Each structure stands twice: as structure tokens, then as C-alpha cells.
Amino acid sequence: MKQLVLIYHSQSGRNEHLAEQLYLGARRGGEVRVKLLRSVDVELAHLQRADAVVWLGAENFGLPNGMMLDCLARQFYGAKQSLAGKPYAVVMSTGNGGAGALRYLENFLGAMGMRQCQPATVFQGELSAQHGSECRAMGEAFAAALAMGIY
Ligand SMILES: Cc1cc2nc3c(=O)[nH]c(=O)nc-3n(C[C@H](O)[C@H](O)[C@H](O)COP(=O)(O)O)c2cc1C
């Protein structure tokens, strides 16, 4: 069975909430095992075993938050050799921006050899119930696409 890994860092709980909603959606999206991980707990083996990864985290000072950067930097050399072509997506809750963090993340993940398989989703400001349901739908669609071999 394919495995979808959701990796997040969250200071106030917003990105954690989005990650949990994606997780709930993905669990009903198809024959896919879904794993939810804090970025601080990620090891190279998690990325290598994943068939696809969704990254979630805030923008801080125009960059991905420090804990996401730490996670990426810790895995960079090993990941670079073993993640070529692996699909990923980015979902972010930010204040009022996101473009800087997104550009940085996409460059970094591209340098790791990962392949972006759907446009990034950036939610700005306060989260609403609508954002939660969008994430559940996105998780379901993502898992279904992975199960069917579309991603
Ligand atoms: C120190 C700090 C720096 C921030 N810098 C930015 C920024 O550059 N751009 C932006 O859109 N939001 C910025 N924010 C707002 C966060 O991205 C936003 O509150 C986000 O939803 C927090 O998600 P989290 O609590 O799940 O980590 C900043 C927040 C903090 C605490």
C-alpha cells in the first residue's frame, strides 16, 4: 500500500490544524497509508518510505519557519540522492504573505529532487471552518490520486 506523509511545524496551532484536517481527508481518500509527523521528528527513512509528501508550515520573516528549515537541512544530503521524482505538495497558513517562504521551499525541495505535483495552497490570516473543509477535501483528493497512480 502506498504511503502519504504529512509533515508540519506549527507555533500557534494553525498549521497543525490544517495538517490534521488533511490527515482526516486523506484517510478516507483511498487505499493509502497516511502518516502525520511533526517536522522535528522527521528522519530520512520517513522521506524514503513515503510515496508522496505534503509539507505544512508558516512563513516567518519571509522564509519558511526555522523548524521546517531545520528539518530540510538535516535531510538534505541523504535526501538529495534518494528522493528524485518523489511527488510533494505545500500547504501553508501564513499571516498576510507566503510568497517568500513558498519560493524558498520550492527551490529547496526541487534541489532535493522532489517533484511538485499540485499548486501550493496558502491560507492567509485567521482560519475558518471553510479552510478546514478545503483541507479535508484536498487530503481526500490527494490520497485518491496517489492510490490511482496519478501522482
Ligand atoms: C516571528 C514571526 C514572524 C512571522 N513572519 C511572517 C511573514 O513573514 N509573513 C507572513 O505572512 N506571516 C508571518 N507570520 C505569521 C505566521 O506565518 C502566521 O501567524 C501563521 O499562521 C502561523 O502558523 P503556525 O502558528 O501554525 O506556525 C509571522 C509570525 C511570527 C510569530
Image: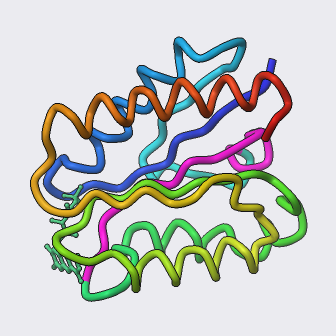
Q: What x and y, as percent, mark residue 96?
A: 18, 74
Which residue is rendered at x = 81% and y = 23% of the image? 148
Q: Is residue 116 left or right of residue 22?
A: right
Residues in magenta?
A: 46-60
Residue 21 horizontal side relative to residue 83, left or right? left
Which residue is located at x 52 percent, y 66 percent?
A: 71
Picture layout, residue 122 above or below residue 18:
below
Expressed as whole percent of the image width and height from the top left, the position of residue 31 reads: 72, 12
Residue 27, magenta (yes or no)? no
Classify the position of the C terminus by image quarter: top right
**Magenta stretch: includes residue 49:** yes
- Image quadrant, ligand 1: bottom left
Q: Please name the residue shown 69% across and 19% down the image.
A: 32
Residue 57 percent coordinates (x, y): 36, 60
Tell me: 67 left or right of 53: left
Name the image quarter holding residue 73: bottom right
Q: Quadrant of the N terminus?
A: top right
Q: Picture coordinates of residue 21 (x, y %)? A: 35, 29
